[in-house]
Structures are given as C-alpha cells and as structure tokens.
Image (tube, rainbow, N blue to C red):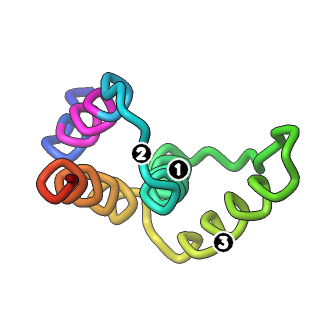
Amino acid sequence: MKPSKLDIEFQKAVDSINGHKDPFPADVLLRLYAYYKRATNDEDRPSGGKPLINAFKTNALFQTQHLTVDEAKELYIETVKNYFIYRK
C-alpha cells in the first residue's frame, strides 16, 4: 500500500525530531510523545523508572485519547513545524 501524503509528512516530522540534537522543552516533548503514541496506535503505557515522568506521560496520553490517528499525525506535524519556526 502506498503511503498517503499525511503519512509521508508525519514520517518527515518524526525524522526531523529524531535528528535534532538540542534539548527540547518538556511541554513540547510531552505533546510530541502523546501525539506520536496516538498516531501510531501504541497502546503501551509509560514504564520508565521515574514515577513523576510516567505520571506526566500518562496525563498527556489521557489528553489525546479523543483524537483519531490522522488528527494525532496532523497535530504532531503542526507541533514540529511550530517548534522549529518559533524556537529561540
């Protein structure tokens, strides 16, 4: 199956984030995390060694549970674009 334009844009956004070497603000990371998990239908819950970080991640996931896969991809792409446009 041929990937859609949205899928291609989403993958480019993911690649740009994965290739970025500078640290991200925590709020941006949480949004990207939640949108990515929703966009990829990843149902796994956070399981790191830091309970506070897991709580923030779980909250971010909870806030995106109403999104469709395509909506999550669009929001991920928008968040990436806005980050790279407006970062200082």
Relative depth, front residue between 25 and 80? 25
Horizontal side, residue 37 vs residue 7: left or right: right
Q: Mark 2 vs mark 1: which is more N-terminal?
A: 2
Q: Residue at 52% of width from left, 56% of height from top?
A: 26
Mark 1 element type = helix
Question: x, y (%) of residue 69?
Answer: 42, 57
Of circles 3 and 2, which is in front? 2
Q: Badges 1 and 3: C-beta atoms under 8 Å apart?
A: no
* Residue identifier under label 1: 33
Please give the residue where the numbered disc 3 appears in the rendered image: 62
Nearer to me, 17 or 72? 17
Determine whether, in the image, residue 3 is placed left or right of residue 48: left
- How far separated are the C-alphas under marks 1 and 3? 12 Å
The residue range painted magenta reads: 9-16
- Disc 2 marks a residue whose amino acid type is Phe
Q: Which residue is mark 2?
A: 24
Residue 8 versus residue 50 in the image, above or below = above
Q: Amino acid at mark 3?
A: Phe
Quarter of the image where the N terminus is located:
top left
